[in-house]
Amino acid sequence: MENLSRRGWLRLFGASAMGATALGLAGGGHSKSSAGPSAIKPYELPALPYPPDALEPHLDGRTISIHHDKHHAGYVKGLNTTLEKLEEARAKNEFSAIQALSRALAFHGSGHVLHTLYFANLAPKSAGPKGALAEAIKAQFGSQETLQAQLTEASNTTAGSGWGVLAYEPFAGRLLVLQIEKHENQILAGAAPLLAIDVWEHAYYLKYQNLRADYLKAIWNVINWEEVNRRFDQARK
Ligand code: MN3
C-alpha cells in the first residue's frame, strides 16, 4: 500500500524514483524495506544547490536563506507531522480528523515538492531552453518570449499566495501554464510541474516589497533551464 501510494505520488508530480532522488525526495522519503510503517523514514529538507547569496542581485541571500531554512523546512515538518497523525489514526482505527489531515497532506506535501522544484529551478547563470524542450515551446507557445509572457502574467495575477507553473500534461503530451493557489489548488491532475515560480510574499517581500512584477522580471535572469530540460525529458519517459 505504501509503495503504491508512493508510486502514485511520484507519478502525479512526474518524478521517477531516480529523479526524485535528484530532487532530494526519495532520499528524504521512504526506505525500500517492507518491514512495516515504522521502517519508513520521514521527509528531509534538501540542501540548497548553491550558496544563499549566489542569485544576487536578482534574489537576495537573506530572502533565500529564510525561504529555504524556515518556510520550506516548515512544510517538510508539517508533512511529517501529518503522516505521523495518519499513522496514529490507522493504529487506532479512528478517522474522525481525516478531512483536516487530508487537506494538510495536500498542502504540506505540495508545498514541499514545489519548493524543492523552485530552488532547483534557480541558478546563478541562466541559459535558455535547448533541444526537445526548446522545440516544444516554439511549437506550442510560438516562442520562448510568449511562454515567459504568459507564465509571468499567470504568476503576477495569482490571487493571494501561490505559484506560476510550467507543466507537462502526459495524456496529450502538451505543455501548459498553471496558476496554482496556495500549494495545492488548481493543480491539473497528472500534469508534471517542470518550472515552478513562487509568488508567496515571503519569496520576494524583503527586496521587492509589494512589487511582485519586479520580482518576476528579475527571476528570468536566474532560471535554471538545464534543470527544466532535465525534468521535461524525465516527464516524457
Ligand atoms: Mn515559498
Image (cartoon, rainbow, N blue to C red):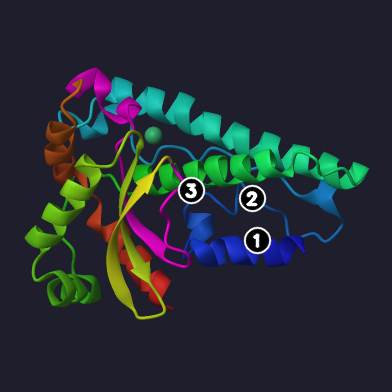
Q: In front here: 71 or 25?
A: 71
Report the residue marked by disc 2. Answer: 29
Q: Is 81 situated left or right of 117 in this image?
A: right
**Residue at point 35%, 68% (across, down):** 168
Q: Taking the image as drawn, is residue 124 in sight?
A: no
In this rendering, is residue 140 above or below 204?
A: below
Q: Amino acid at mark 2?
A: Gly
Label 2 environment density (alpha carbons within 10 Å; few <14, some 14–19, many ≥20)? some
Amino acid type at mark 1: Arg
For residue 185, above or below residue 130: above
Q: CA distance from mark 3 to mark 1?
A: 13 Å
Note whether residue 213 is visible: yes
Secondary element at tag 2 = loop
Where are the magenta residues, as a range?
183-208
In x, y percent, where is residue 51? 33, 32
Q: Residue furthest right?
A: 92
Which residue in the protein does label 1 denote?
Answer: 6
| Residue 138 % position (x, y) | 12, 73
Q: Secondary structure at mark 1?
A: helix
In the depicted view, which residue is nearer to us: 63 or 54? 63
Mark 2 or mark 1, earlier in chain:
1
Q: Could you tell me residue 147's position as x and y percent?
A: 15, 60
Measure the C-alpha gap from mark 2 to mark 1: 9 Å
Amino acid marked by disc 3 = Val
Q: Residue at x 25, y 18 (%)?
A: 206
The label nearer to you, 3 versus 2, is: 3
Determine whether, in the image, residue 137 is placed left or right of residue 68: left
Give the residue pinned by disc 3.
Answer: 113
Which quarter of the figure is the C terminus placed in?
A: bottom left
